[in-house]
Image: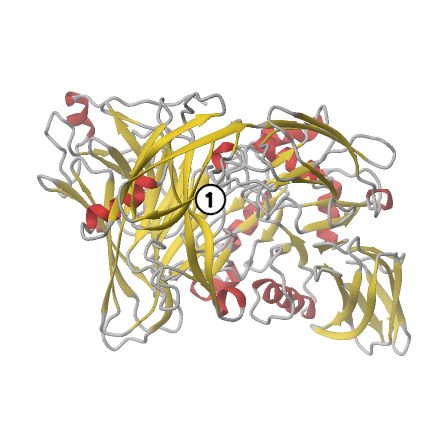
């Protein structure tokens, strides 16, 4: 990608900063402070509107969305771009978005038909004093059940020659108003196709909402209040004072203060954005010492060498310590404090001579080193009470070359996960690898620790096959070569059932998966139809189409239109056209998708950024056409035993539509943003029946007709006359018989039959892995529907679309 580069010059600076009267350009030739009006000078920045502006000093630059949409189409005035300044030049954009959130990702509703998401330009102010620039966003937030909106004033302060930005948000609830109860208010950081860390205490880093961290009374983790997005040569952190709650995934992380906003009271939320010009996080912790000199810190320094005694530049010295967090009713259904979890705190990179130096809070740590091409060093315990020197030695690594075949000896695409080693810094490559689409080989640099490594190799695992496991102790510089056989346990394509995961992200926006890796990941998952669905962008669709064609897979072109109040999948989007605007109303988005010949999917309807969750506050949320979408998404978080589970609620909503005779069918999506994470492509998938050649058109037709089901494991094959989405016609008093074959690689646990939103029959199985034929009979007295919910031996669900029954009187 060609990058734009802007060099500050005195004449150009003055011309570029003809700003409103509230904003003044800097005048010092040393570039201590300045403002640029209009499209951002930051390389690859997204703030491109004439009303946007960028503030900078000699170290960092930040662009604000004034005319441009907030990336998530939430309240305008947020930060779209952050860059390092070097020698008077604006660097490359490092973040996707930084913003203040009033209550998780719930967008403000329209108040008395007034759009509160798009703050008037005159309410976003930029004022420069001699030694600082202050950006102020005057906004409001309202949700149904409140007479008046909150007054929300957000301030960003950039001082001369500082690599951080001060954050201060004031939230006022007018006297006489209702309380805004249990508000998760704080700051959000989303990555720009990079890696993320934090907050310290919550480990391992899994997708979660409502985890108690940091200042929570049962946690009390002093350094559990910062999150980071980082790459090979930068780190950007958001630190929030008093943070006690967390929500996040691989693409975004949020820190909140959980409290009730009482009427007549004002609350402050403060913190900082810290920008580091290296891919290390130790300087973030050192900022705590700068703010509070009374904190007891000590100097740690040393050197990293290889086994021959040569210094190792660019190695990562990892500092770990025990941390804590608390599961909550919101995150896990019950409270449970998790303590004494050894986990990474910060890391420091070595210089050209393999040396490093950092200041840390006094305390007990475990330290080790990771470096590309080397085996991680052994851990050293460190009781830090005074300045200390430590030395590390790293051994050479090894290589693995695996090829995977099926029971016929035919090569198949696969994924390999390596366990038994430490992998902390994601920019080093991680522990998950995929086969090359052409050679079918998995080639990986691996460590050579003294302990045994475990290699887990999968293809269509959990659905059509089981993993293969290899355990081996490798030696430095060894090349481990293996051919692995993964037998097919359940046939699906031969029965004309084809799989897809239609909600997946690449490396646009908050996604961290290069498009070629997304292609490999879907092939390894055994998906037949391949897809990509990025937020408000089709920038990678053409490339994925080429990649899918190269391996003989149908391509499902998709787009996730992402208003702040709810996301919509446009399956079958024409990627040669301009993406549908997120500024449209629900009915307009649906109409625009249909005009392209696409299916419209309501994505994750009950997340805090889902349409059904926010509908009461959405402008024209109940207008005609707002229910004319085609599919309703179920995700891998499904738990039908929890009535508050967002996917249980989504299924309930689908059943409500079915009760009204509205043929809105189920689809599924992993919503994965990192192909190497545990939220992998196809973790939940849709199988659709296609009688004939499978193609984008025929697959989408099957989804539209409801000839499909969603699953996290169980495989379902209905008999003739029992096809999902079909209609059976009987006379009153007659019996309808539905039959289907069930099988699961992890064994079958149960099947339930639902009708009109309630279970009407259930059968238990003894975790058999054999195929089972299940038959259900009923004599309905009126028009109705039946669908199946199947569970496998690991508690994973499959949910079918309904079979309609028409009863003739």
Assign a secondary structure to mark 1: loop
Q: Which of 457 and 410 is in front in this view?
A: 457
Residue displayed at 53% across by 62% down: 606
Q: Which of 673 and 300 is in front in this view?
A: 300
Residue displayed at 57% across by 66% down: 645
Question: Which image quadrant is residue 638 in?
Answer: bottom right
Indicate whether 254 appears above or below 739. above
Question: Which image quadrant is residue 749 in?
Answer: bottom right
The number of discs equals: 1
Residue displayed at 60% across by 57% down: 628
Q: x, y (%) of residue 420?
A: 60, 42
Q: x, y (%) of residue 39?
A: 30, 32
Q: Answer whether residue 489 is visible to the viewer in this image.
A: yes
Q: Nearer the viewer, residue 774 or 398?
A: 398
Residue displayed at 71% across by 50% down: 686
Q: Mark 1 points at which residue?
A: 581
Q: In this view, does 465 lie to the left or right of 5?
A: right
Label 1: few (<14), some (14–19) or many (≥20) C-alpha neighbours in 10 Å: some
Indicate whether 511 appears above or below 552. below
Q: Is residue 644 left or right of residue 453?
A: left
Q: Answer whether residue 121 is visible to the viewer in this image.
A: no
Q: x, y (%) of residue 417?
A: 64, 40
Image quarter where the C terminus lies is bottom right
Q: In this view, does 15 lie to the left or right of 505?
A: left
Q: x, y (%) of residue 331?
A: 50, 64
Colour style of the rendered protein structure = secondary structure
């Amino acid at each position: 990608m060609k990058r734009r580069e802007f060099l500050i010059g005195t004449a150009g600076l003055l011309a570029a900063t003809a700003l409103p009267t509230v904003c003044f350009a800097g005048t010092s030739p040393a570039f201590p402070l300045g403002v640029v009006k209009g499209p951002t000078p930051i390389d690859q920045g997204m703030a491109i509107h004439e009303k946007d502006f960028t503030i900078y000093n000699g170290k960092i630059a930040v662009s604000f969305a004034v005319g441009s949409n907030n990336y998530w189409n939430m309240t305008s005035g947020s930060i779209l771009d952050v860059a390092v300044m070097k020698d008077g030049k604006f660097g490359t954009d490092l973040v996707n978005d930084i913003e203040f959130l009033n209550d998780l990702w719930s967008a403000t509703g329209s108040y008395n038909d007034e759009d509160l998401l798009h703050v008037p330009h005159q309410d976003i102010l930029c004022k420069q004093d001699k030694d600082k620039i202050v950006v102020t966003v005057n906004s409001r937030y309202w949700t149904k059940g409140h007479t008046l909106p909150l007054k929300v004033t957000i301030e960003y302060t950039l001082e001369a020659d500082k690599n951080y930005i001060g954050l201060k948000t004031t939230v006022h609830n007018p006297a006489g108003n209702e309380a805004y109860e249990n508000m998760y208010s704080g700051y959000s950081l989303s990555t720009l196709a990079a890696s993320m860390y934090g907050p310290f205490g919550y480990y391992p880093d899994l997708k979660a909402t409502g985890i108690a961290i940091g200042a929570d009374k049962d946690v009390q983790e002093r350094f559990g209040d910062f999150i980071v997005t980082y790459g090979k040569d930068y780190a950007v952190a958001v630190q929030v004072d008093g943070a006690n709650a967390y929500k996040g995934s691989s693409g975004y992380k949020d820190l909140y203060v959980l409290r009730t906003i009482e009427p007549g009271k004002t609350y402050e939320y403060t913190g900082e954005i810290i920008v580091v010009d290296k891919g290390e996080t130790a300087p973030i912790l050192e900022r705590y010492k700068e703010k509070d000199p009374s904190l007891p810190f000590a100097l740690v320094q040393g050197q990293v060498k290889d086994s021959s005694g040569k210094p190792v530049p660019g190695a990562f010295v990892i500092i770990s310590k025990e941390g804590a967090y608390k599961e909550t009713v919101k995150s896990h259904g019950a409270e449970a404090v998790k303590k004494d979890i050894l986990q990474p705190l910060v890391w420091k990179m070595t210089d050209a001579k393999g040396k490093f130096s950092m200041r840390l809070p006094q305390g007990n740590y475990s330290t080790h080193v990771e470096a590309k091409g080397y085996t991680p060093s052994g851990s050293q315990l460190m009781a830090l009470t005074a300045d200390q020197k430590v030395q590390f030695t790293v051994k050479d690594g090894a290589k693995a070359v695996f090829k995977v075949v099926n029971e016929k000896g035919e090569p198949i695409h696969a994924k390999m996960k390596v366990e038994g080693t430490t992998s902390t810094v994601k920019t080093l490559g991680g522990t998950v690898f995929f086969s090359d689409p052409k050679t079918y080989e998995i080639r990986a640099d691996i460590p050579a620790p003294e302990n045994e490594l475990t290699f887990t190799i999968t293809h269509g695992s959990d659905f059509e096959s089981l993993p293969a496991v290899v355990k081996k102790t490798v030696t430095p510089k060894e090349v481990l070569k293996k051919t692995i056989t993964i037998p097919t346990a359940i046939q699906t394509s031969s029965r004309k059932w084809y799989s897809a995961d239609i909600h997946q992200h690449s490396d646009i926006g908050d996604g961290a998966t290069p498009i070629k890796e997304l292609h490999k990941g879907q092939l390894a998952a055994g998906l037949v139809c391949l897809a990509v669905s990025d937020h408000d962008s089709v920038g990678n669709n053409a490339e994925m189409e080429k990649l899918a064609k190269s391996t003989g897979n149908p391509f499902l072109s998709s787009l996730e239109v992402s208003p702040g109040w709810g996301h919509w999948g446009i399956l079958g989007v024409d990627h040669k056209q301009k993406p549908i605007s997120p500024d449209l109303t629900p009915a307009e988005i649906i109409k625009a998708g249909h005009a392209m010949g696409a299916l419209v999917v309501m994505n994750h309807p009950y997340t805090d950024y889902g349409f059904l969750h926010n509908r009461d506050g959405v402008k024209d949320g109940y207008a005609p056409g707002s229910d004319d979408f085609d599919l309703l998404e179920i995700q891998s978080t499904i738990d039908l035993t929890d009535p508050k589970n967002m996917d249980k609620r989504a299924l309930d909503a689908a059943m409500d539509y079915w009760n009204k005779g509205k043929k809105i069918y189920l689809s599924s999506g992993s919503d994965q943003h990192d192909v190497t994470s545990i939220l992998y492509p196809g973790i939940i998938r849709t199988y659709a029946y296609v009688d004939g050649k499978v193609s984008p058109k025929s697959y989408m037709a099957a989804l539209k007709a409801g000839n499909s089901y969603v699953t996290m494991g169980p495989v379902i094959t209905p008999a003739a006359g029992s096809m999902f989405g079909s209609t059976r016609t009987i006379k009153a008093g007659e019996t309808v018989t539905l039959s289907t074959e069930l099988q699961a690689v992890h064994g079958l646990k149960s099947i339930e039959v639902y009708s009109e939103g309630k279970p009407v029959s259930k059968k238990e199985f003894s975790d058999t892995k054999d195929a089972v034929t299940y038959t259900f009979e009923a004599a309905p007295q009126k028009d109705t529907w039946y669908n199946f919910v199947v569970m496998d031996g690991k508690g994973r669900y499959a949910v079918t679309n309904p079979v309609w029954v028409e009863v003739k009187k």
